[in-house]
Amino acid sequence: MTNGPVLTLREHEILEFIAQGLSTKEVAQHIDIAPRTVDRHVENVRLKLRAKNRTHMVACAVMEGLLQVKVDREEHSSPSAFPQMGMPEHD
């Protein structure tokens, strides 16, 4: 049993695509459904997670354990992955 929101398989699939940064149109093309249908699924997920917008929806899904964040340590550890923005370095 779970205490958190329950997503359908399709909602979870679409949530994963949204978390990867795909647009509604791109998701629709990937899974061969209408963009309007993708929007309906996104809205259902957003409401189930009580999120304010898509970004908040992804964050809520991670916090609820519905999505896992995968980090490529080598990619993100290189200095070029984080360009200098004029921020002071901390020791």
Image (cartoon, rainbow, N blue to C red):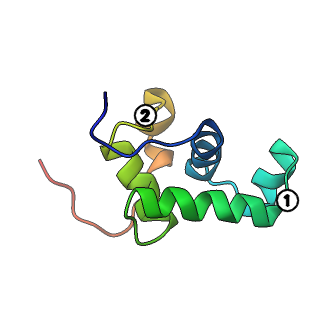
Quarter-of-image position of residue 39: bottom right
Q: Position of residue 85 (x, y in %)?
A: 38, 67
Q: How far across and down, in percent of the image, does residue 49 sit?
A: 39, 56
> On residue 68, which mark appears?
2
Q: Residue at the spot x=58%, y=42% of the render?
A: 16
Mark 2 lies on a secondary structure that is loop
Q: Quadrant of the N terminus?
A: top left
Q: In the drawing, what numbered circle is on residue 56?
A: none
Q: Who is closer to the viewer here, 22 or 89?
A: 22
- Could you tell me if residue 23 is visible in this image? no
Q: Could you tell me how far apart the alpha carbons at marks 1 and 2 are, in whole angstroms?
A: 27 Å
- Residue 4, above or below 23: above
Kindly give the residue lying farthest to the front in the view shown: 1
Compared to 37, does 76 lie above or below?
above
Q: Residue at x 47, y 70 (%)?
A: 53
Q: Position of residue 71 (x, y in %)?
A: 45, 33
Which circle, 1 or 2, is nearer the viewer?
A: 1
**Label 1–label 2 contact, CB within 8 A:** no
Label 1: few (<14), some (14–19) or many (≥20) C-alpha neighbours in 10 Å:
few
Residue 29 visible? The answer is: yes
Which callout, 1 or 2, points at the residue further toward the start of the chain? 1
The residue beneath circle 1 is 34
- Secondary element type, mark 1: loop
What amino acid is found at the position of numbered circle 2 in the picture? Gln
- Using the image, determine if residue 22 lies above or below residue 9: below
Residue placed at 57% from the left, 65% from the top?
A: 43
For badge 1, the amino acid type reads Ala
The one nearer the camera, 56 or 80, is 56
